[in-house]
């Protein structure tokens, strides 16, 4: 597969699996939702040409220093824990 991955590609990858097969993600990520994506507000009257798959974990910010030292790491996720009460995020951890 190339850089671009389409819904048709995903359907092909999942062909043959029963509807009740559990989907798991490496690294302990948990699925949150699928969100339509538009390049601009002008396009929102049309069907979205892209989708974004969101996870329950927050994406950690990567500092410029960290990115220079570890160019192979493109994204890092962080688990936000809480007691179930309303969560106040004061900042996303930076690596």
Image (cartoon, grey):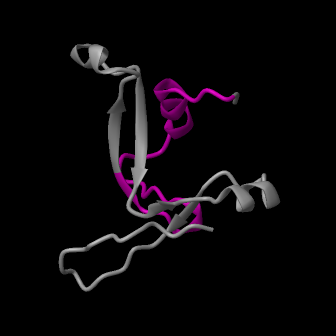
- Residue 89 lies left or right of residue 91; in this view the side is left
Give x and y (percent) for residue 83.
Answer: 25, 86
Task: Looking at the picture, tell me which residue is in the foreground, 33 or 17.
Answer: 33
- Image quarter where the N terminus lies is top right
Please state, as top left, top right, bottom left or bottom right, where the C terminus lies in the image.
Answer: bottom right
Of all residues shown, which one is farthest toward the right? 69
Q: Nearer the viewer, residue 84 or 95?
A: 95
| Relative depth, front residue between 5 and 23 | 5
Q: Is residue 46 above or below residue 4?
A: above
Q: Residue furthest bottom?
A: 83
Q: How far from the left and from the top, in percent, is residue 15? A: 50, 35
Quadrant for residue 94, please give it: bottom right
Q: Position of residue 32 (x, y in %)?
A: 34, 55
What is the total number of numbered labels drawn onto the structure image?
0
Magenta range: 3-32
Q: Residue at x 33, y 70 (%)?
A: 89
> Which residue sits furthest left?
85
Residue 30 lies within the magenta run: yes
Residue 4 position (above or below residue 43): below
Using residue 52 as the reference point, say whether residue 10 is left or right of it: right
Say if 7 sits above or below 77 in the image.
above
Residue 53 among those drawn in magenta = no
The image position of residue 77, as x and y in percent, is: 53, 63
Q: Residue at x 40, y 20 (%)?
A: 49
Vertical relation: 41 (above or below) 94: above
Q: Quadrant of residue 26?
A: bottom right
For image coordinates 25% across by 74% down, the residue present is 87
């Amino acid at each position: 597969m190339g850089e671009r991955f389409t819904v048709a590609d995903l359907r092909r990858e999942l062909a043959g699996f029963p509807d009740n097969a559990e989907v798991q993600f490496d690294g302990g990520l948990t699925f949150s939702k699928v969100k339509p994506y538009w390049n601009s507000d002008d396009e929102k009257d049309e069907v979205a040409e892209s989708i974004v798959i969101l996870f329950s974990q927050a994406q950690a910010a990567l500092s410029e220093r960290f990115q220079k030292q570890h160019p192979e790491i493109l994204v890092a996720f962080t688990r936000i824990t809480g007691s179930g009460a309303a969560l106040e995020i004061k900042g996303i951890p930076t690596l």
